[in-house]
Amino acid sequence: MKQEISKELINAASRCECTDFIKGDPVQFPHRYTDRRDIEVSAFIAAWMAYGSRKVFLGVLDRLHSMMDAAGGPYLYVTTGAWRNNDSEGCLYRFYKWTDFSMLCARMADVYSRMESLENLFVPGEPLEKGVLNLCREFDGVNGIPVPGSTSANKRLYMFLRWMVRKGSPVDFGIWTRITPAQLLVPVDTHVYATAKALGLTSRSSADLKTSIEITAQMTEIWPDDPARGDFALYGSQVM
């Protein structure tokens, strides 16, 4: 990587990764909580919803979190089955229906009936993709969750993992320990892909999983123990 590009990315990450970032991002919702179980459930739902119009999906997430808080918080909402009391029907947001949200909650409730955390689906020392496969299998068939073994970039899932794993960040929580920050991939969406392409960090023609791996390898040159910091760098870069 050219030195001037590396310097631009380091400066962009420093500008972007700050508490002000939280206000306009779906990560604001898990930041409402202090209990790690509430943080995890809120984060998974927030990441699941994070596509399309930011203004709109943040409004939907605010509504969902008000419902969950009325039941004692996200974790209790899911594990006590409070979501069954929701009689809303039809469209929740874009391609999501209220039944999709209910199915997501039902699957989470099932996981939590068998294990303490979604983190238990990841085995220390095993490749990250095995844990991702386990996670996708638990939610197979839920609208918005990647098909097990998907070759798409899985941006929202890797964003969720970034939130859970990265430590020492004003934005991310670092409450999981079975995965190391060095294992994470940069979550790739349209903007991150376009910026990486403009900087010459990928030669791929589409934003798929291989593209995420390629971009992550470039970020490892700057942050070998924390390549996912490149997400902030590319989001905040002024190259575009």
Image: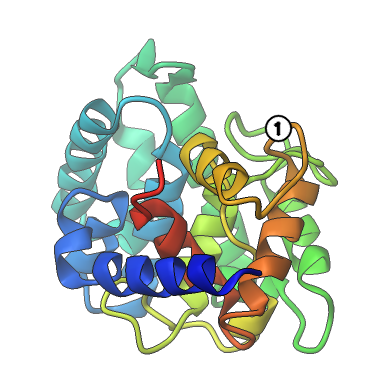
> Mark 1 belongs to which amino acid?
Gly
Q: Residue at x 30, y 50 (%)?
A: 26
Neighbor class of circle 1 (other Cα within 10 Å; few <14, some 14-19, many 20+) is: some
Residue 45 versus residue 213 in the image, above or below: above
Q: Is residue 79 visible?
A: no
Give the colouring mode of the picture: rainbow
Image quadrant in which the C terminus is located: top left
Q: In this orientation, does residue 176 appear?
A: yes
Picture residue at 26% right of the left edge, 50% below the top: 25
Displayed quadrant of residue 133:
bottom right
Residue that label 1 marks:
141
The quadrant holding residue 76 is: bottom left
What is the x, y in percent for residue 107?
59, 48
Quick check: 127 left or right of 117? right
Residue 147 lies in quadrant: top right
- Residue at the limit of the structure toward the top, as seen here: 90
Position of 10 relative to 130 (above/below)? below
Residue 174: % across, % down = 43, 82
Q: Where is residue 140 in the image (x, y as percent from the top left)?
A: 73, 40
Q: Where is residue 24 in the image (x, y as percent from the top left)?
A: 19, 48
Q: Which of 198 and 206 is in front in this view?
A: 198
- From the viewer's side, name the closer residue of 10 and 178: 10
Q: How many marks?
A: 1
Q: Nearer the viewer, residue 230 or 171?
A: 230
Q: Quadrant of the N terminus?
A: bottom right
Q: In this view, does 183 lie to the left or right of 42?
A: right
